[in-house]
Amino acid sequence: MVRSKGYVTVFISLVLVIMIVVVLVVLEVCDRNHARIKMSTALSSAMSSELANYNRYIYDRYHILLLDTHSSGGSEGAMEQSVEDTLNTDLTTEYKVESVELTNKVYITDNNCKEFKKQIKENFKYEAAENIVEKIMDKAEGNDSPVDEEMVEGIDEDIKSRQEEIEISEEESKDDKKKKKKSKKDEEDVTDPRETLKTYTDAGIASLLLPSDVTFKEEELALDKLPSGGNSNDENMMIDTTFSDKDHMEADGLKSGGWGSLITDKAGSLSYANEYFNSLTEHKYDDTCLNLEKEYLIAGKSSDGENYKAVVNEILVIRFGFNFGYIVTDTAKMGECEALAAALTVEFPPLEPVVKYLLAGCWSYIESVADVYMLLRNHKIPYIKDVTSWRTDFESLAHLEELSEEADEEQGLAYNDYLIILAGMQGDKLELRMLDLIQENTKRNSDKSFMIKNCITSFGINTDFSYKGRHYSYHEETGY
């Protein structure tokens, strides 16, 4: 009996020991799990605190979330220290933060500005972007190729046919030759409009067209310090205004075609640019580094003046293509060109059909200059001309200010519509140049040391902790 009591005592003692061990193990496990949860929560909180340090000026002005890893003149090490300080504040002294490493940084400029484009789509009314592009395409009647290869071939065939006719007519009577001699005498009274045009192009067409109330900023951008790296358009579209070479003229007519798909693909970015940046005819902000910001998005030059000239030349290219595409279908105007060409080529008649088309090109360019004159003064211009909307003759450059300013306000495209078209033709340079302006305006108005190259939209943290002699490692990622 005494022995049985002894067995029971031993058994109960063993059970109690096991229970105590189990409880201790459970408590240890709970403690470790609690520690893991606390460390993980503290790390998430610390990373959220860093996300809250987004650049306020950029968000308020441009609705883009950026985290500057070098804010207030610091460095990425300062950001790591900030995370460590937050962890030490949130955790008790039993926890020791052994290391914090910033990893997996995604910069706003990575992958052709993929993150910038994503934020534009998420933070901006993308439907409005699509509507802007649709309206432009509607007004252009879906036609983004004013002069095509078929038209060029038709011109070449017409010239060849007319030259054959002239060669046959060279075998003429003496009386006809005397008449031709008389025509040569009359030639002295004929003025070649291409020579007249040269006096204006030599003086600078862009300067001639500049509205008197436009102000250019005096400062210039340091292009090599911008996110785009100063990737300006060194090969801006321009027209050969001598109109002495048919092949050059035809090539100029082909230059601006095929932009329809480009602006469709860039709908979001184009709408964003239209909303947040100034232009010559839409001045929204007074605190910008340039007044002509949209023009910079197109040309990428360092000053307002240079960007203005480049954009004027590029709009002239677009207008020239469509005006030339129309004039060659207008029998009356081509008749005028033919008569003038005949008077200018009395000495060598086979040149007449070529000169006829060169004069048509010259006239198309004069019409284009008048179009841009009106656009710069905030009028709309019919995209595809007809006999009622053609505004010029060969003498019109002398009195642009006298041209009727009664543009159709319902139809046609305005200056900013052309800026959207030209911006859409810039490819991935468009987003980089927007970041150029965001950087320079932020430096001007908020933080002089700010640089887009230091800005991220997401990041990861590798962290090592120690707790009661045990080592713990964590990796978490977060972003906007």
Image (cartoon, rainbow, N blue to C red):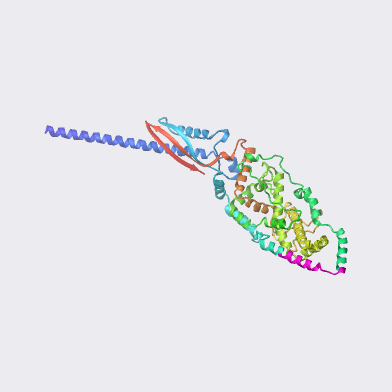
Nearer the observer, 42 or 217: 217
Q: Is residue 358 left or right of residue 19?
A: right
Q: Position of residue 106 (x, y in %)?
A: 52, 42
Q: Main secondary structure of the magenta part?
A: helix
Quadrant position of the N terminus in the picture: top left
Tally of numbered tags: 0
- 477 shown above or below 264: above
Residue 473 percent coordinates (x, y): 41, 36
Q: Residue furthest top?
A: 93
Where is residue 3? Give x, y as percent: 12, 32
Quarter of the figure with residue 188? bottom right
Q: Residue at x 54, y 38 (%)?
A: 53
Q: Is residue 104 magenta?
A: no
Q: What's drawn in magenta, residue-wise? A: 157-175
> For this rendering, which residue is in front, 149 or 160?
160
Q: Is residue 442 above or below residue 328?
A: above
Q: Quadrant of residue 288?
A: top right
Asked whether, in this view, residue 163 is left or right of residue 471, the answer is right
